[in-house]
Image (cartoon, rainbow, N blue to C red):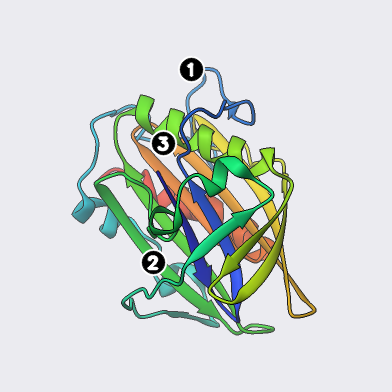
Amino acid sequence: MRFRVATALGLTAVALLALPGCSAKNTETKSASTPSTHNGKPTTAGQNHAPLSSAALKERLLDVSDLGSGYARKPEGTAQHDDVTVLGCPALNDLGGDAAMGGSLDFPRKAKATFTYTGSSNSEVSEELYSDTTGKLSSATGRIFAAMTGCPNYQVLVGGTAVDIATRKTTAPQLGDERWSQLMTFSAGGRDTAVKQTAVRDGSVLLIVSGPPPLVDRHIDKALAKATAAR
């Protein structure tokens, strides 16, 4: 279906989205009988499985006041996509260039925000929210992360630039009903960039936070708490 190449200080993140025919062995699940909690309090999205609208999701995104000092909201721009070829991972290459640069998951209900952080060095952290039936969110996200970590080393050609990518599964925080996490290392022009991507499904809401590992770990809990708060 789709995957995304995000650019921040050069190419710093690749998110491969929803491949058919891949198993979801990398999914970590919480027992259905165990309620989701944040700071000891039950969440609400897991109790209400009706999908939320894009407008409702937008209201649940983090904002600068949630993140603290040193952050600024990055304006949304028009994406310009180069031709993309994946080498060393046939399943990903089968997506094709247009699908590869699609920019988002194929769920109609979605919202996204990207922030720059200048606390130590210029970095970006992005938050994506999606909503659909629990079954669709679960199966699609499981296929994404299974495909990504199923090809631990591959190369992406973006226009005339070759980027070597290494991926590995990491331990996801015990949040929500299901969760996935991976660390991606991008190597291009003699420079390595590490990007962590963590996804959490809580009921009919899917949260994905991507960026430098410390920033993802710092904000994933508050992002899910806001995304699943009662309105």
Residue 27 is situated, as x and y percent measured from the top left of the image, at: 59, 30
Marking on residue 32: 1
Tag 2: amino acid: Ala
Q: Nearer the viewer, mark 2 or mark 1?
A: 2
Q: Nearer the viewer, mark 3 or mark 1?
A: 1
User: In the rendered view, would you say 150 is above or below 220?
Assistant: above
User: In the rendered view, would you say 161 is above or below 94?
Assistant: below
Element type at marker 1?
Answer: loop
Mark 3 to mark 1 CA distance (whole Å): 14 Å
Could you tell me which residue is drawn at 58 percent across and 49 percent down?
Answer: 198
Tag 3: amino acid: Thr
Could you tell me which residue is drawn at 58 percent across and 64 percent down?
Answer: 13
Give the labeled residue for mark 3: 43
Count the marks.
3
Element type at marker 3?
Answer: loop
Q: Of marks 2 and 1, which one's residue comes earlier in the chain?
A: 1
Tag 1: amino acid: Ala
Q: Of marks 3 and 1, which one's residue comes earlier in the chain?
A: 1
Q: Nearer the viewer, mark 3 or mark 2?
A: 2
Marking on residue 113: 2
Element type at marker 2?
Answer: strand
In contact (CB < 8 Å): disc 2 and disc 1: no
In contact (CB < 8 Å): disc 3 and disc 2: no
Residue 28 is situated, as x and y percent measured from the top left of the image, at: 61, 29
Could you tell me which residue is drawn at 53 percent across and 54 percent down?
Answer: 15
Task: Answer with left or right where residue 185 lies relative to residue 79.
Answer: right
